[in-house]
């Protein structure tokens, strides 16, 4: 039984390896350069003077809120959305 299982495992491994190698996408070097250029262009166009707010999670699943205001250069990192709202209100509605 062990021999049959090992043989089946080898066949499955070979099939998987062949399938993966056949379906890998080829990206020509020029296309890779164009993709990088396009991403930089979009990032530059999107980076205006608007407030940026995003949420991150660490490995433990703890979430934190980040904000950056390019107009003033101020940034913050807080633990809750309520704290983030308070920070934004303090920055813009004083």
Image (spheres, rainbow, N blue to C red):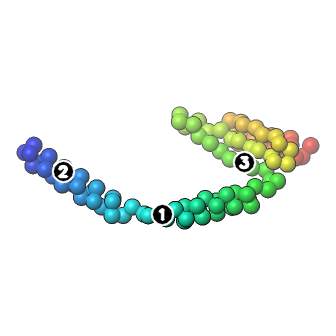
Residue 10 is tagged as: 2
Q: Is residue 22 left or right of residue 86?
A: left
Quadrant occupied by the N terminus: top left
Q: Is residue 18 left or right of residue 42?
A: left
- Spatial separation of the CA atoms under disc 2 and disc 3: 50 Å
In this view of the protein, can residue 53 be seen by the observer? yes
Q: Give the farthest residue toward the right.
A: 94
Q: Which residue is mark 1?
A: 27
Identify which residue is drawn at 49% across, 65% down: 28
Check disc 3: other Cα within 10 Å, few if <14, some if 14-19, many if 20+: some
Mark 3 lies on a secondary structure that is strand
Residue 63 is tagged as: none
Residue 53 is tagged as: 3
Check disc 1: other Cα within 10 Å, few if <14, some if 14-19, many if 20+: few
- Spatial separation of the CA atoms under disc 2 and disc 1: 30 Å
Q: Nearer the viewer, residue 12 or 90?
A: 12
Dot 2 or dot 1: first in sequence order is 2
Q: Is residue 70 above or below residue 48?
A: above
Dot 2 or dot 3: first in sequence order is 2
The x, y position of residue 83, in whole percent, is 75, 38
């Amino acid at each position: 039984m062990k021999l049959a299982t090992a043989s089946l495992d080898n066949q499955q491994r070979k099939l998987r390896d062949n399938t993966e190698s056949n379906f890998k996408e080829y990206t020509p070097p020029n296309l890779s350069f164009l993709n990088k250029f396009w991403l930089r262009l979009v990032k530059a166009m999107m980076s205006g003077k608007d407030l940026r707010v995003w949420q991150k999670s660490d490995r433990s699943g703890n979430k934190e809120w980040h904000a950056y205001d390019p107009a003033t250069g101020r940034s913050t990192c807080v633990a809750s959305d309520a704290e983030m709202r308070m920070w934004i209100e303090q920055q813009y509605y004083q």
